[in-house]
Amino acid sequence: MNGIRKHVASYKHGMRGIKLAFRYEFAMRFHLIAAVGVILVNYLLQISRTEWLITLILIGLAWMAEAFNTALEKVADRITQDQDVLIGQAKDLASGAVTIICLFAVVCALIIYFPYLF
Ligand SMILES: Nc1ncnc2c1ncn2[C@@H]1O[C@H](COP(=O)(O)OP(=O)(O)OP(=O)(O)O)[C@@H](O)[C@H]1O
């Protein structure tokens, strides 16, 4: 019972994290606007159920990568705000993770939307 209560509490912390991310992170709001755009285009083009799933999974992965990136930046800034090679690399890697999923999302979007448009 204690375990279940703890598990439910961790979802509450998670919701707080999601609120924080959308309230204070410009990049997260940008991803939200992009997601709304994608959902709109999906409706307009009447894409298949599988294509809906792929786009929704990619949206989730992009938000997840951005949230991890923000978390890592906060921890790194707590460790030191001085210039540090390893901190710089850690931040670049976390930012790279976001860039990777965004690049794949763009490629997938082209593959999915192209046949509907041309
Ligand atoms: N303490 C540091 N030491 C060395 N380089 C740093 C440090 N802090 C930031 N950088 C460099 O500046 C970049 C931007 O870091 P910053 O903390 O400003 O994140 P940001 O502008 O919010 O980036 P992102 O767009 O990835 O969210 C990092 O990817 C890193 O290359």
Image (tube, rainbow, N blue to C red):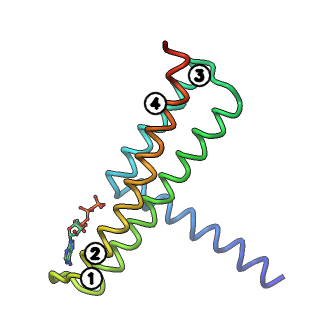
Which circle marks residue 37 in the picture? 4
Q: Residue furthest left?
A: 83
Dividing the image into four quarters, tell me where ligand 1 lies: bottom left
| Residue picked out by circle 2 | 89
What is the CA distance from the residue labelled 3 to the residue labelled 1?
Answer: 44 Å
| Residue picked out by circle 3 | 43
First of labels 2, 3 by sequence position: 3
Q: What SS does tag 3 mark?
A: helix
Disc 1 to disc 2: CB gap under 8 Å: yes
Q: Position of residue 32 (x, y in %)?
A: 44, 43
98 to 114, vertically: above or below: below
What is the CA distance from the residue labelled 3 to the residue labelled 4?
Answer: 10 Å
Which circle marks residue 86 in the picture? 1
Counting other residues with Cα less than 10 Å from the Cα at mark 3, is it few (<14), some (14-19), or many (20 or more)? few
**Mark toward the viewer: 2 or 3:** 2
Give the residue displayed 38% in from the left and 47% down from the top: 29
Give the camera-side residue of 78 and 57: 57
Q: Amino acid at mark 1?
A: Leu
Counting other residues with Cα less than 10 Å from the Cα at mark 1, is it few (<14), some (14-19), or many (20 or more)? few
Q: Residue furthest right?
A: 1
First of labels 2, 4 by sequence position: 4
Give the camera-side residue of 8 and 45: 45
Q: Position of residue 2 (x, y in %)?
A: 79, 85
Q: What SS does tag 1 mark?
A: helix
